[in-house]
Image (spheres, coloured by chain):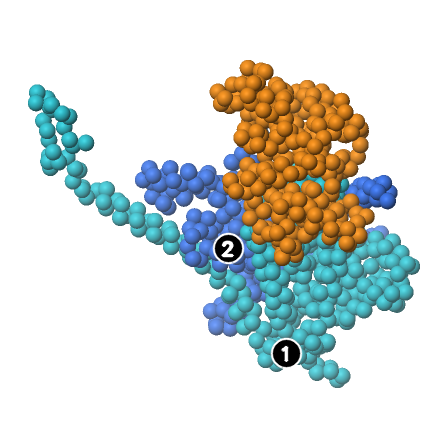
Chain colours: A orange, B cyan, C blue
Amino acid sequence: MTGDKLVVENLNAWYGKTHAVQDISLSFPDKRATAIIGPSGCGKSTFIRCLNRIHETQPKARAEGKVLLDGADVYADDPTEIRRKIGMVFQRPNVFPTMSIYGNVAAGLKLHGGYSHDEMDRLVIESLKKAALWEEVKEKLDQSALQLSGGQQQRLCIARALAVQPEVLLMDEPASALDPISTARIEDLIFDLKNQVPVVIVTHNMQQAARVADRTAFLYLGKLVEVAPTRDLFERPAEKLTESYITGRFG
Amino acid sequence: MAEPPVGTGTDPLPATGPAEPAGATPSPSQGPDRRRSFTGVVDRFFGGLSTLAALVLIALPALLIVIITQASWRAIVRFGPGFVIGQFWVPSASPTSPITFGAAPFVAGTLETSVIAMLIGVPLSIGAAIFLAELAPDWLRAPVASVVDLLAAVPSVVFGLWGLYVLVPYMRSNVDPALVHYLGWTPLFASHAGSQSGVSVLTASIILAIMILPTISSVSREALRATPDSQREAALSLGATRWEATRLGPLAYARSGIFGAAILGLGRAMGETMAVTMTIGNSDNFATSLFDPGQTLSSKIAINFGNALPLEKSALIELGLILMGLSLLVNVAARLMLRSMTRMGGSAP
Amino acid sequence: MRPPKRLRRRVKSAVLLGLCATAVLITLLPLASILLECFVNGAGAITPAFFLQNPPPPCNPGPTTPCPVGGIQDALLGTLLLVVVASLIALPVGILGGIYLSEFQDRPLARPARFLADVMTGIPSIVIGVFVFGIFLFFAEQGWISSFSITSGYTGAVALAVIMIPVVARTCEEALRLVPVSIREASLALGIPRHRTILRIVLSAARGGVITGALLAVARAGGETAPLLLTAGFTTGAITGLSGWTPSLPVLIYYSAAGGYANTTQLAWGAALMLVLIMLLISVGARLALRNKFGGRTA
Ligand SMILES: Nc1ncnc2c1ncn2[C@@H]1O[C@H](COP(=O)(O)OP(=O)(O)OP(=O)(O)O)[C@@H](O)[C@H]1O
Ligand SMILES: [Mg+2]
């Protein structure tokens, strides 16, 4: 299928003996945001953590199957390169506490190297603007990232992820630790971002999925139940299970 | 509650208000009351005892300073501040020199040995801590960590014995000649006559480096382990290699803890006595080359104390005072550093 | 420009992580060597006579002259006595101090006491030796004790106690803190007085940790040499209680190692082997004591 940036085929993931992701096949089109919903513990986080191969960095964690980025198998490449191409934002803001705001955004660029000073400045500013944080921090780039508020820190994490120019952006409940105003800002941000990179966002909040995502996938007990354009999934779910979940009859 | 249900005309329940029979509340009997006041006394007595113990904890360092100052007063008065920079230790008058005592060579020896020990020991112990905290699989971590900690249980006199009979000969026949061969042109590694015995500032420093390994590595290990996983994942998700993720995540996060650990190690190195006394060669001269024999504050005290006359004893105690000052400084710094680490948010291990 | 840089990063990562692993090996090497040398050089000295004799005059074995290795009898006894007396002083004070730090932690003394206890554990033991010598010197100058009693087993035991107290207090505090607050509240709610709650319930729940702390402090005191050199003195003769010069195992090792005579050197290695074995036993015992209680806190 043309236009699919990321294709997942028969993905399985384990924690020791726990089979957390079971045989999921799913593709993510370019320039679209895809939401992943499902009850707690159904394997949403595990699933997206397999896409940038961060799942396997945990003890006893294992994954099998194919993940293709532009047709190339992610599991055949160097994981550090894959993680640069597939950025990730976590549930709780995890800024580097000993670094400045600038240092946080530039951290990835410094790792990969090959950027001149001017290029780096330009990319940092650009990323902060994309993350809608620039106006708030432009006066204090050299101050500690810890003094930002929770919502600002999360946007800083988004800027940090964007700075290395990823080809896909994964977000695991990026707004669940934030207040409504910060949440709204992040949602606006995702809405803008998806025109540049495909976004995969895990969320517990179905309104949020409806607001930001073009497509939504419903996971249950480690399996993919249904994936459809967001509207369709919420208005005419094909599966009984999906319907009872979105109408709040379980979970 | 007190309001009766509507239409209780035939209700047999008597509408008793607040008027209760007087005997319902238990009248205070004497027994329990007296017992309560008795336990109150015991409680207070016990509280007093433990307060006393806490006072001992506070008083000991204060007393330490007072007593050591008092016991070295004789030397302080006699030699004044010149003691600290004095270069000669002459306990009995001779035709060429009057009685005089000076601390300079020993202060220099203490600083020299502990700095070299840190240069060798700190990278090793941080490396070991990184391996044990970040890289080792679970089944390897706990046993190896315990074995490293066992090194701390070896008494320092046993290190000294091992140093004297194992390390010193090894240095004499293998390490020192090689260092002279390659680095002999630098003043630090210059070899002059009589400096190839193996007992030297360098040997003592190496023993010290070994002895501070468990201290630094176990405290750093705890600091590294206290780093939340989200820090490692933040780095990994940017495409960091395993080393880079360790550097950006745990090493940065735990840096004040690691720094505190290193300073704690420095404190231990400065005060260590037996192992140094047995391997440094006990010479009162300044060591200009690392192959020279030397003396530290602690080794000088250990060597001379037994046979010293009162004035010399007082001077030796003044060496102890200097050592105490140095180690108080270092330890307070280390503790403040470690405390700021736990405050920064690492859940204390 | 990218691919070579990527390779370089991977190599750098592998090399540095490899160095970390090497650092562990280098750390383990001296321990292995120390244990090995103690066994190789010391095992031969350990005969029944080793426990029943005292250090001999130093000599080298000649073709005709006998040159006995001697033993550690009175030094072992001295160490035992010193540590017992030191523990009698330090354990009550240290445990009560630990109770204060943990159970009365919001009182004003708790913070300075904890901080100073931590600082004290870092003070070199030879400085403690000088300190306690200074105390007894002061007593003698005041005429409260004879100046012959300055160097005595009692002075040595006090020095060891001063070393032990902050260690015991801090480890006891840490152990008590692991006991859940709910246990204290439940006990107090039942009307059990505070001191009984602490002594009978909290202390007994934490006894594994408290025993561990006490054992570690005993181990540390038992291996100390420098402070005893200044306070307890040494003798190769028989021990005469703690009122005179009192031999101890560590100081015996120190004096026997000097000079390089064949027999005393072997005695030093034998004594070192004994001391290391005792220390390792206590350390392992301390770990086991900790494992039994509260699901084994993994350090
Ligand atoms: N580190 C781990 N070790 C072992 N099992 C784990 C681990 N992380 C998750 N699991 C298990 O894997 C399953 C899927 O977990 P996952 O975190 O992917 O769920 P989730 O859908 O993200 O849930 P939530 O919405 O609560 O974040 C769960 O059953 C969980 O118990
Ligand atoms: Mg999750």
Image coords of residue B210 (percent x, y): 73, 52
Is residue B89 depicted above or below C246 in this figure? below
The crowd level at tag 2 (other Cα within 10 Å; few <14, some 14-19, many 20+) is many
Residue at mark 2: C-beta within 8 A of ligand 1: no
What is the distance, in whole Å, between disc 1 and disc 2 at their CAs? 34 Å
**Label disc, if present, on residue C114 of the rendered structure:** 2
Q: Determine whether, in the image, residue B246 is placed left or right of residue C111.
A: right
Q: Amino acid at mark 2?
A: Arg
Pointer 1 and pointer 2 on the same chain: no
A245, A46: nearer the viewer: A245
Query: The numbered mark 1 sits on a residue in which chain?
Result: B
Residue position for label 1: B81
* Residue A56 seen from this side: no
Residue in the picture at 17% in, 38% down: B26
Query: The numbered mark 2 sits on a residue in which chain?
Result: C
* Residue B115 seen from this side: yes
